[in-house]
Image: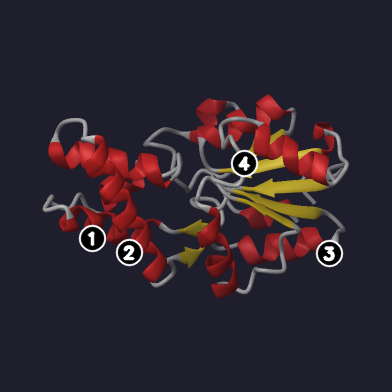
Amino acid sequence: MHDLVRDIRLVAFDLDGTLIDSVPDLAVAVDAALEDQGVAPVGEARVRDWVGNGSWRLVERALEAALERPADQGVLEACHARFLAHYHASPVERTRLYPGVREALEGLIAHGLSLVLITNKPQAFIAPILEHFALNDAFALCLGGDSLDEKKPHPAPLLHAAAHFGLSPEACLMVGDSRHDIEAGKRAGFRTLAVPYGYNHGESVTDSGPDAVVESLSELV
């Protein structure tokens, strides 16, 4: 096992950009929602830099970019509702599991570690995605961006997960692709590990100072 995991008892994983490349489906839903409002689509490349702070902020960024000004609250609410509807209708048609993910999860479970999923994606989308990839039994706990009062980079979801299993933060590891994951992990007292291939607003995740970086999650086992 990776040195960072040797005395760890719980591993928390981010979802989008860490386990799955979901941007193709997210971008289709964003563009469809914009078109419903009579606004020009923004395209997948731009959406890729906006993922990570939850669906509301994603739609807000897209609207602001398309309109070239802040969006009115009513328009934003309507666009967000349409985004959720479009994404709910097709959340995994183009989404792919990153290489090494399945091997990492299976290997960590085989070593007796508890796995949890902590994402800023709305809770309602988690189960369909995990079921599609036959990963619904991999995680002992799943927390979405609307599961608690706070979401990453706030440490609350991570501390909730540690407390759920009766573990100290020092026995836990946060794995993610963005500065929000690393910040949440540090604030919670978790060790932190980053992957460089995900979504981090065009920045290098190494700039956030994780304890370690791996090119593939398969390196964990």
Would you name the residue on which mark 1 appears? 32
- How far apart marks 3 and 2 lie (CA) works out to 37 Å
Q: Nearer the viewer, mark 4 or mark 3?
A: 4
Would you name the residue on which mark 4 appears? 148
Q: Residue at x 74, y 39 (%)?
A: 160
Q: Secondary structure at mark 2?
A: helix
Give the quadrant of residue 149. top right
**Which of pointers 1 and 3 lies earlier in the amino acid sequence?**
1
Q: Position of residue 7 (x, y in %)?
A: 87, 42
Question: Residue 174: in sight, yes or no?
Answer: yes
Q: Quadrant of the C terminus?
A: bottom right
Which is nearer the eye, 20 or 69?
69
Disc number placed over residue 86 in the picture, else none: 2
Which is nearer the eye, 221 or 44?
44
Q: Position of residue 74 (x, y in %)?
A: 24, 41
Q: Secondary structure at mark 3?
A: helix
- Looking at the picture, which amino acid does disc 1 mark? Ala
- Looking at the picture, which amino acid does disc 4 mark? Leu
- Looking at the picture, which amino acid does disc 2 mark? His
Q: Residue at x 72, y 69 (%)?
A: 137
